[in-house]
Amino acid sequence: MNTSTSRKMLIAGLGNPGPKYARNRHNYGFLSVDALLDAGTARPLSMGKDGELHALRLPGIEAELLALKPQTFMNLSGKAVAQVLRFYKLEVADLIVIHDELDIPLGRMRLKMGGGLAGHNGLKSIAAETGSQDFARLRLGIGRPEGKMDVASYVLQDFRAEEQGIVAKVLPASVAAVRLYLAQGLDAAMREAGQFNACPGRDEQG
């Protein structure tokens, strides 16, 4: 990872395009990128229909950042990510992906580098298009569905009314985690992200 002003870094939040999906659990990555854009100074960049791309400056962060919301639908997220990496001559090490995570409870988050894809179709697509799984991921917990609800149906549901207040606490914390990753590196950001809990007192799931 290179955070000098001579190199850009790409922050890609995953989700599905259009108002139908805007508040879905699966669009947590989009919501986090929106929070990042609000936290800094952003200007739109043209990349065609495959993505919404912004140049982003965050206060106190020297790196020039690119913030991406792929518009290719979740299962083809890698198409937009790989397109930006190629155009700006970035490496996979210059990428951080923000996405929803079933194996972490709502209100919690984890940051990690590389590893498995946990059945997440957006991550699978990025790995397939870039030829690597060695990119940073900020995993925003949504928990698993209760009872026998199908996972695919669950992730495409909107956050429930009682969940929206939790999400509102997580989003600024996700911005803080990204800022810390950019400023101080992986280890510091992993610790900070792992300690965050928007729902203290809830039973731990992971």
Image (cartoon, rainbow, N blue to C red):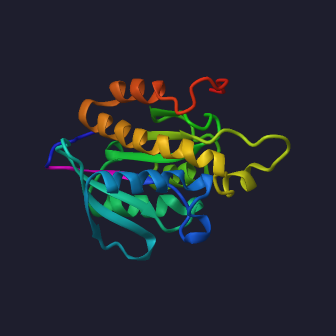
Q: Quadrant of residue 1?
A: top left
Which residue does the image show at 64% across and 26% down from the upper left? 202
**Quick one: 163 or 80, which is closer to the camera?**
163
Asked if the stretch drawn in magenta spans residue 9, the answer is yes
Pinpoint residue 120: horizontal percent, then vertical percent. Answer: 61, 47
Number of numbered callouts drawn: 0
Visible in this render: residue 187? yes
Pinpoint residue 13: horizontal percent, then vertical percent. Answer: 45, 53
Visible in this render: residue 133? no
**Quick one: 129 or 36, which is closer to the camera?**
36
Pinpoint residue 31: horizontal percent, then vertical percent. Answer: 47, 54
Reply above or below: 56 against 3.
Answer: below
**Quick one: 3 or 22, which is closer to the camera?**
22
Which residue does the image show at 46% across and 47% down from the upper left? 98
Q: Which residues are magenta?
A: 6-11
**Quick one: 70 or 161, which is closer to the camera?**
161
Q: Quadrant of residue 93?
A: top left
Which residue does the image show at 43% across and 76% down from the upper left? 49
Which residue does the image show at 36% across and 51% down from the upper left? 11
- Residue furthest to the left: 6
What kind of secondary structure does the magenta stretch mostly adopt?
strand
Q: Quadrant of residue 81?
A: bottom left
Left or right: where 139 falls relative to 33: right
Left or right: where 110 falls relative to 144: left
